[in-house]
Image (cartoon, grey):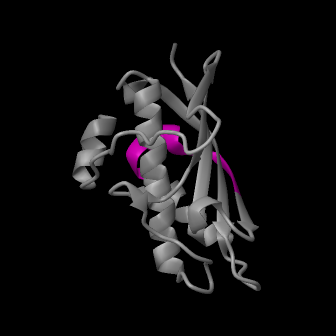
């Protein structure tokens, strides 16, 4: 495995998309000191929300985990935009907050968000180990199955 983030992404067959523009009145990221706060990312692929519906209802667990992976890819894309293309400035993923649109009775939100956590750890190694929340919600914007935001520590 390559020792660069771009090399690890390539080894995993991942090409980062262009960072998505905000869908409402907010900014995609804020840098405060050495922290980068990323707004929530949806499972967007090819310019549209790729996984929609309620997990445990319309959406099966493996598809929801794929949605979380797409959110993680979009987190990295936003970080790349915020850091002028230099992902090596990421020193640590501090926290991921995962939101899962959940059908009544679905209680495996933690397994859904593992899709993002695993991808981040595979791409960033030790810097990708993070604190996390995995929360079930009734509905997400654009009927997305998953949304994830992130806090990153960065080199100045």
Asked if residue 118 shows in the view, the reply is no
- Image coords of residue 66 (percent x, y): 44, 68
Residue at 76% x, 84% y is 104
Decide which of 80, 129 is in the foreground and name it. Answer: 80
In this view, 72 is above or below 6: below
Q: Which region is colored magenta?
A: 121-133
Image-quadrant location for residue 113? bottom right
Q: Is residue 125 magenta?
A: yes
Residue at 49% x, 54% y is 71
Q: In this view, does 64 lie to the left or right of 97?
A: left
In this view, 87 is above or below 99: above
Q: In this view, does 16 lie to the left or right of 58?
A: left
Decide which of 19, 105 is in the foreground and name it. Answer: 19
Decide which of 22, 14 is in the foreground and name it. Answer: 22
Decide which of 46, 30 is in the foreground and name it. Answer: 46
Residue at 65% x, 36% y is 25
Q: Is residue 46 magenta?
A: no
Asked if residue 78 shows in the view, the reply is yes
Q: In this view, does 116 lie to the left or right of 54?
A: left
Q: How many marks?
A: 0
User: Dominant secondary structure of the magenta stretch?
Assistant: helix
- Image coords of residue 68 (percent x, y): 51, 61
- Image coords of residue 85 (percent x, y): 35, 26
- Image coords of residue 79 (percent x, y): 47, 33
């Amino acid at each position: 495995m390559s020792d660069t983030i771009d090399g690890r992404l390539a080894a995993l067959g991942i090409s980062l998309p262009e960072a998505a523009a905000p869908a409402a009145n907010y900014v995609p990221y804020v840098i405060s000191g050495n922290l980068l706060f990323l707004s929530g990312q949806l499972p967007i692929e090819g310019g549209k929300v790729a996984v929609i519906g309620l997990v445990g209802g319309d959406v099966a667990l493996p598809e929801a985990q794929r949605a979380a992976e797409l959110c993680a890819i979009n987190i990295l894309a936003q970080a790349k935009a915020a850091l002028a293309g230099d992902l090596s400035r990421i020193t640590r993923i501090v926290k991921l907050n995962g939101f899962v649109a959940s059908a009544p009775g679905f209680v495996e939100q933690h397994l859904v968000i593992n899709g993002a956590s695993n991808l981040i750890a595979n791409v960033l190694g030790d810097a990708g180990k993070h604190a996390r929340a995995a929360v079930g919600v009734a509905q997400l914007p654009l009927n997305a199955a998953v949304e994830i935001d992130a806090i990153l520590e960065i080199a100045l």
